[in-house]
Image: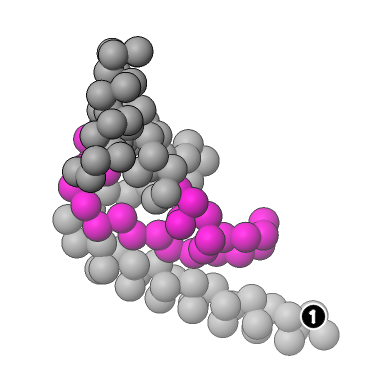
Amino acid sequence: MNLETQALVNYYEKRFHKGWHYGYIYPAMNKALQAAGRVIRTPTDEGIIVLLDNRYTHSTYKELLTPHAHICFDAQPFENIKRVLERKECQKGVNAKKRRLHS
């Protein structure tokens, strides 16, 4: 932990008795969620966000994740991602066929 983070942790610990939360956890989660937000910009965008760190499975972190996202905690995320992408490709093919039929 760098000196700035340690100073924040110490300050918030003295002030609110939640130094670790305000000085470390909240800023880290804010950065992670901001990065995740870059994947999906419009209501029609779709994406997969993978957080490769066990800390996201702890309740302290899980509570801070966006409530409207479908969140899956998995020991083998890449298998699930592959299935999702394959399903999306199948759906694209079905939708393309429907469009051709209705044209």
**Which is more toward the observer, 84 or 58?**
58
| Residue 70 in view in this figure | no
Q: Which residue is mark 1?
A: 102
Tell me which residue sits at (67%, 56%) in the image. Answer: 43
Residue 83 position within the rendered picture, expressed as x and y whole percent measured from the top left: 34, 69
**Which is more toward the observer, 9 or 44?**
9
Above or below 35: residue 19:
above
Tell me which residue sits at (39%, 50%) in the image. Answer: 32
Tell me which residue sits at (52%, 55%) in the image. Answer: 37
Q: Which residues are magenta?
A: 33-60
Tell me which residue sits at (32%, 30%) in the image. Answer: 8
Is 53 magenta? The answer is: yes
Task: Kindly state the secondary structure of the residue where label 1 is placed.
Answer: helix
**Which is more toward the observer, 2 or 72?**
2
Residue type, label 1: His
Above or below 13: residue 65:
below
Residue 76 position within the rendered picture, expressed as x and y whole percent measured from the top left: 19, 61
Is 19 magenta? The answer is: no
User: Hey, which residue is sitting farthest right in the picture?
Assistant: 103
**Which is more toward the observer, 65 or 96?**
65
Residue 47 position within the rendered picture, expressed as x and y whole percent measured from the top left: 49, 64
Above or below 49: residue 58:
above
Dominant secondary-structure state across the stretch colored magenta? loop
Along the horizontal axis of the image, is 5 left or right of 45?
A: left
